[in-house]
């Protein structure tokens, strides 16, 4: 059983479908399938050993918060201008209502599983670290040749700077994900897990060193500032004052890399603040207008795409007739059909994206759920693993949730139900 969960958790971050035709089919759906398989095995074990299971009160409170969040999500979906999109999620992001139902099942079932079999926590962590190493190894060839994407059409071009799989040259290296930003968070998260596993003695010093030597350079190669900052914040949280001599040079090195990456990106001679944030400020301004129009229940899951036409094209718009992945069709006030571009499908901020999707009524239980789970872990012998969630919060200040990697943070928060002290889990 230990080896099974090591394999399942490795697959949840490295699985792709090379023969897919769309980004979601290639990179998103296989990883979601890995989560689904994990849920099925969780249920089988829990059902077989249900007589031995004692469910703590904290689990029921988590379940209640999940139910409130999903209930608001259902209402938001039913009232959304595009309910089917809200249910299924945008093709690449994949984080529609059905995905969140799966994440709730995954988190709640894994909490109970770790209560029955605490030793599986070590196997799951090791599986994710192994997956992080495989991801890191996939980055290096792409840094040399950007045309490698590990799909059936690898090396084939759609245009001079676009692969047949629709990956742009400036998005490489992507590893086993649809964007280098996604890969950067997974690398940062698995680096944090490696450090936690080493501190807990679940991973030997030698294995932790090998994993770090591969994962951290791969993270640097992605040139994604949010991923580097997420790792720096989580490492500072874990190491604290005891290891400040290591933190200071590491932080300086990280800031130098972030500075170089920022100054070498020229976005149409934008002002300094927009240059630093890659013009996130504009997206945040648009999001604020979208929230003002639907503050309580939002626009449905993946709400930015639904809100954008209404708030950005309101002077020209009569109604939106279709919402695609990065385009939308609308009828103007003269009755003419037109097509326009969506600059992105996300607001690039966790609070804004959540509020756009499920409104204030959905955001409050979501934040309460995050805070409650982190508080429970901090009070437990498994303190430290919440650093993955801290890295996620730092990352999603300028990024977003995606079905390719969001399960990692909820896995770390499922440790709150562990019944056996960490020290008694024998390596």
Image (cartoon, grey):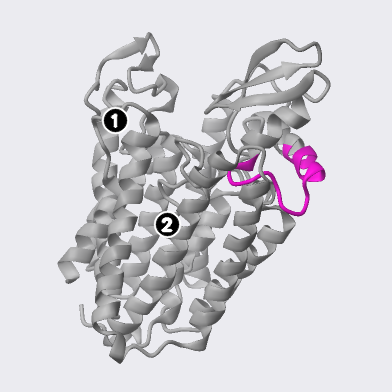
Q: Which residues are magenta?
A: 287-303
Number of callouts in the render?
2
Q: Residue 127's x, y, as percent? A: 25, 60
For residue 112, side relative to residue 306 (left or right): left
For residue 123, side relative to residue 412 (left or right): left
Q: Which mark is residue 20?
A: 1
Q: Which residue is mark 2?
A: 407
Q: Residue 220's x, y, as percent? A: 40, 40
Please indicate, yes or no, whether residue 235 appears anywhere in the rendered image: no
Residue 294 sits inside the magenta stretch: yes
Q: Looking at the picture, does residue 393 appear above or below residue 166?
A: below
Q: Quadrant of residue 304?
A: top right
Residue depicted at x 51% and y 87% = 57
Q: Residue 281's x, y, as percent? A: 71, 35
Residue depicted at x 49% and y 56% = 100
Q: Are marks 2 and 1 in contact (CB under 8 Å)?
A: no
């Amino acid at each position: 059983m230990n080896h099974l969960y090591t394999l399942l958790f490795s697959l949840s971050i490295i699985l792709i479908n090379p023969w897919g035709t769309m980004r979601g089919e290639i990179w998103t759906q296989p990883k979601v399938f890995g989560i689904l398989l994990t849920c099925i095995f969780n249920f089988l074990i829990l059902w077989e050993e249900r007589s031995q299971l004692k469910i703590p009160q904290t689990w029921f409170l988590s379940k209640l918060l999940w139910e409130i969040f999903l209930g608001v999500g259902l209402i938001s979906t039913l009232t959304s201008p595009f309910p089917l999109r809200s249910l299924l999620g945008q093709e690449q992001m994949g984080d529609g209502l059905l995905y969140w139902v799966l994440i709730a099942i995954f988190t709640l079932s894994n909490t109970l599983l770790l209560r029955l079999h605490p030793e599986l926590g070590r196997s799951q962590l090791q599986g994710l670290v192994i997956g992080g190493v495989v991801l890191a190894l996939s980055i290096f060839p792409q840094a040399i040749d950007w045309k490698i994407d590990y799909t059936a059409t690898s090396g084939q071009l759609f245009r001079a700077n676009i692969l047949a799989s629709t990956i742009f040259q400036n998005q490489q290296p992507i590893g086993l994900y649809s964007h280098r930003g996604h890969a950067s968070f997974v690398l940062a998260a698995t680096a944090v897990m490696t450090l936690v596993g080493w501190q807990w003695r679940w991973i030997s010093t030698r294995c932790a060193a090998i994993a770090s030597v591969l994962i951290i350079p791969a993270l640097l190669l992605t040139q994604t500032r949010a991923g580097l900052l997420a790792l720096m914040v989580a490492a500072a949280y874990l190491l604290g004052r005891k290891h400040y001599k290591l933190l200071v040079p590491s932080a300086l090195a990280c800031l130098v890399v972030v500075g170089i990456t920022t100054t070498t990106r020229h976005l149409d001679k934008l002002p300094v603040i927009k240059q630093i944030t890659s013009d996130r400020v504009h997206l945040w301004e648009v999001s604020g207008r979208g929230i003002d129009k639907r503050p309580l229940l939002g626009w449905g899951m993946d709400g930015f795409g639904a809100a954008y036409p209404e708030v950005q094209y309101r002077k020209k718009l009569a109604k939106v007739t279709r919402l695609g992945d990065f385009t939308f069709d609308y009828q103007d006030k003269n009755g003419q059909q037109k097509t326009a571009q969506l600059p992105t499908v996300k607001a690039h901020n966790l609070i804004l994206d959540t509020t756009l999707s499920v409104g204030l009524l959905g955001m409050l239980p979501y934040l309460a759920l995050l805070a409650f789970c982190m508080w429970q872990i901090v009070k437990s012998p498994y303190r430290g693993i919440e650093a993955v969630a801290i890295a996620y919060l730092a990352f999603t200040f300028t990024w977003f949730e995606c079905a390719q990697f969001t399960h990692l943070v909820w896995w770390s928060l499922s440790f709150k139900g562990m019944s056996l002290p960490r020290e008694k889990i024998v390596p």
